Image (cartoon, rainbow, N blue to C red):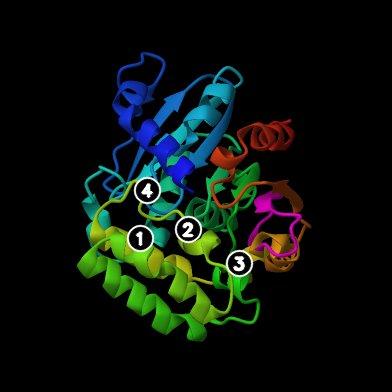
Amino acid sequence: MEQRRNILRGLVGGGLLWSAGSAVWAQTAFSSRRITVTTRGRGADVLLIPGLASTAEVWRSVADRLAGKRRLHLISVRGFGDLPAGANASGAVMATVAAEVRRYITEQRLERPAIIGHSMGGQLGLRIAADSGSRIGRVMVVDSSPFFPALISPQATVGDVEPIAQLAFQAIHFFGDEALRAHGRQMGLELGGATDAVFGTLGWQGGDRRVLAQSLYEVMTVDLRRRLPDITAPVTVVYGWSADGNSPRSRTDSLFRGAYARLRNPAAFVPIEGAEHMVMIDQPTRFMAAVDRFLA
């Protein structure tokens, strides 16, 4: 875990040079008070959406590999990392951010783009695909579930998790993301299982307390499983897995397959051994092989 934090700190430290100092990256003319978008490369369009408390920096190595073959659109949510909260400072976050991404796709006239989303970004990708029909070409979700608590306890309901989500909201809102690192494990134990898929990486890039608190609350309580039949685009689900029966990650294959059972077309499932929640950082070579297959 500490190694991954150090890697991401290094990415964040070089972020200004990467996104602003290189001529090959460009800030789009798209104006939004909820997201920012940078682009690179030419070819078929691919949107990269990061997870909770992360910015597009987490996709740096993936983008470097794909830029010569695809036109990349790297999305960051305002209020994560060093980005000012903007309109995300009040109200719901995920639904409005998803609507902004759909507006971006429409205004930029993207033709059936692929979406790759990590964690919360995967949920955003599912929501966008469900609302966009055939306008989305394909979706890859990376260690993301339409209902995250079901990965901890398959029988969990929104009612079960609501009190825990409220506590998490209050802790982050008043004490910052350090509170989540301190208490996340106990929150997961109250649900009866492993916690890394929901709590394990929060706080790496931090952000606005209110945006982090509201976003986590929504990630924990929004159940998108009922929207899965609305998705017509092919879906690929990539997730960390372990062959060690004593590891909570040994159960992920069956948990993810169950989570996506309502898709109208069966998903392609890609377990990546040795990875936890940050699959693209934990196992970059195996992850890129999965991305290449997804985009082929």
The residue wearing badge 3 is 227
Q: Quadrant of the C terminus?
A: top right
The answer to whether residue 135 shows anywhere in this view is yes
Question: Which residue occupies 34% across, 26% down?
Answer: 14
Is residue 107 among the parts visible in the rendering?
A: no
Above or below, 88 against 40 in this view is below
Nearest to the eye among marks 3 and 4: give it: 4
Q: Nearer the viewer, mark 4 or mark 1?
A: 4
Q: Which residue is mark 1?
A: 93
At label 2, the amino acid type is: Gly
Name the quadrant containing residue 209: bottom left
Q: Between label 1 and label 3, give the one nearer the viewer.
A: 1
* Residue 45 percent location from the top left of the image: 56, 31
Q: Quadrant of residue 13?
A: top left
Query: Mark 3 to mark 4: distance in Å?
Result: 30 Å
Q: Where residue 160 sits: x, y (%)? A: 51, 85
Labels 4 and 1: the sequence-earlier one: 1
Q: Report the front residue among 30 and 245.
A: 245
Q: Secondary structure at mark 3?
A: helix
Label 3 Cα crowd, 10 Å radius (few <14 / some 14-19 / many 20+): some
**Residue indicated by mark 4:** 204
Give the residue drawn at x 44%, y 75%: 186
Whether 157 is drawn above or below 139: the answer is below
Distance Cα–Cα, label 2 vs label 4: 10 Å
- Whether tag 4 and tag 1 are in contact, CB under 8 A, the answer is no
Can you identify the residue that label 2 sits on?
200
Q: CA distance from mark 1 to mark 3?
A: 18 Å
Assess disc 2: are there few (<14), some (14-19) or many (≥20) residues with their C-alpha within 10 Å of its C-alpha.
Answer: some
Q: State which region is magenta.
A: 230-247
Reading the chain from its start, which is encountered first: label 3 or label 4? 4
The reply to whether dot 3 and dot 4 touch (C-beta < 8 Å) is no
- With 19 as the anchor, is 149 left or right in this view? right
